[in-house]
């Protein structure tokens, strides 16, 4: 069984969702027969590569959030992340263009290290509060998980995997995905938002029992739909 995940490394719900999916798989009897593939999704591709500003300021401006609204949203997300064992320093994160991070994830996948790279990038952004748009930093993070730093540096200096990122995003548009995380199970069942592990386990069990022929995705939106900000289970464009 194949689970395709669209996410962005600057989306807190995507990290929460990744942990919930890992929890669901750990309790799924057929987990050894499940392949998880991460696909690219840029929440804000217009973000300048050299921009260095607090993410909180960017979110407040983008979604028109007042101080009280922003604080309440951050408190809620931070608490849910803590429940999954995540240390999210949301007030200290820095904005970043994530196109290169997605290229790096594709490069890591070519070496069988996609999951490790995704996790390291999440930690770099939310816990280390690093500017993940910086190519030198990305090369160093890749080296931490065992990738060749020189290869990563060369890849990011060129346009390697750029087409793969665009292909992922084109597929997301074709599926009508406007917020992440989004899961597509066996090309048949779509799940929107960072659903609880129990919901994901139920989806996995149903997909395994039916072993469906791939068809157009249907959204199993049990608890959340993309909203106007990074809240309520997903981050929207």
Image: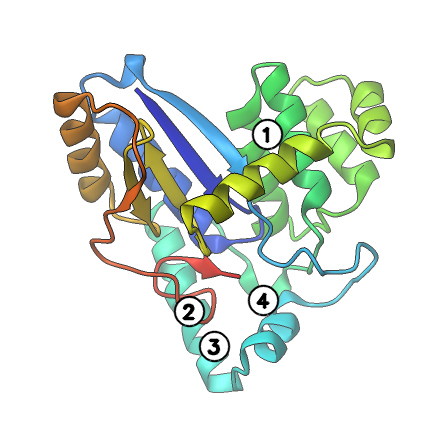
Q: Residue at x 83, y 37 (%)?
A: 136
Instruction: Measuring from the top left, give residue 170's x and y in whole percent.
Output: 56, 42
Asked which secondary structure carries label 2, the reply is helix
Circle on res. 91:
4
Q: CA distance from mark 2 to mark 3?
A: 6 Å
* Crowding at mark 1 (Cα within 10 Å: few <14, some 14-19, many 20+): many
Q: Nearer the viewer, residue 226 or 93?
A: 226
Q: CA distance from mark 2 to mark 4?
A: 10 Å
Q: Which residue is mark 2?
A: 75
Instruction: Measuring from the top left, give residue 122's x and y in whole percent.
Output: 56, 43
Q: Residue at x 76, y 17 (%)?
A: 148
Q: Is residue 107 above or below residue 127?
A: above
Mark 2 and mark 3 residues within 8 Å of each other at the beta carbon: yes
Q: CA distance from mark 4 to mark 3?
A: 9 Å
Asked which secondary structure carries label 4, the reply is helix
Residue 72 appears left or right of 62: left
Instruction: Tell which circle, 2 or 1, labels the residue nearer the N-terminal end.
Output: 2
Instruction: Measuring from the top left, give residue 198's x and y in whole percent.
Output: 18, 41
Q: CA distance from mark 2 to mark 1?
A: 27 Å
Asked which secondary structure carries label 1, the reply is helix
Mark 2 and mark 4 residues within 8 Å of each other at the beta carbon: no
Instruction: Tell which circle, 3 or 1, labels the residue nearer the N-terminal end.
Output: 3
Q: Nearer the viewer, residue 141 or 237?
A: 237
The image shows a total of numbered marks equal to 4
* Crowding at mark 3 (Cα within 10 Å: few <14, some 14-19, many 20+): few
Q: Which residue is mark 1?
A: 117
Q: Residue at x 29, y 13 (%)?
A: 33
Q: Which of the 4 image quadrants contains residue 152?
A: top right
Circle on res. 71:
3
Mark 3 and mark 1 residues within 8 Å of each other at the beta carbon: no
């Amino acid at each position: 069984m194949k689970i395709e995940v669209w996410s962005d490394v600057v989306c807190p719900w995507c990290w929460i969702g990744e942990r919930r999916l890992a929890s669901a798989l750990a309790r799924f009897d057929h987990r050894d027969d499940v392949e998880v593939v991460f696909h690219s999704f840029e929440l804000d591709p217009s973000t300048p590569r050299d921009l260095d500003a607090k993410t909180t300021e960017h979110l407040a401006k983008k979604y028109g959030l007042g101080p009280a609204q922003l604080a309440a949203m951050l408190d809620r997300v931070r608490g849910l992340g803590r429940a999954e064992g995540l240390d999210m320093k949301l007030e200290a994160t820095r904005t970043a263009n994530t196109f290169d991070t997605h290229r790096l994830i594709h490069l890591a996948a070519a070496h069988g290290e996609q999951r490790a790279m995704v996790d390291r990038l999440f930690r770099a952004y939310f816990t280390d509060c690093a500017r993940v748009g910086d190519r030198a930093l990305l090369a160093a993070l890749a080296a931490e998980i065992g990738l060749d730093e020189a290869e990563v540096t060369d890849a990011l200096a060129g346009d390697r995997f750029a087409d793969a990122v665009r292909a992922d995003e084109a597929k997301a548009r074709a599926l009508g995905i406007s917020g992440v995380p989004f899961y597509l199970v066996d090309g048949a069942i779509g799940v929107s938002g960072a659903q609880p592990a129990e919901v994901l386990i139920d989806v996995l069990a149903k997909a395994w029992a039916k072993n469906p022929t791939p068809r157009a995705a249907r959204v199993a939106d049990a608890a959340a739909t993309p909203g106007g900000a990074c809240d309520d289970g997903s981050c929207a464009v």
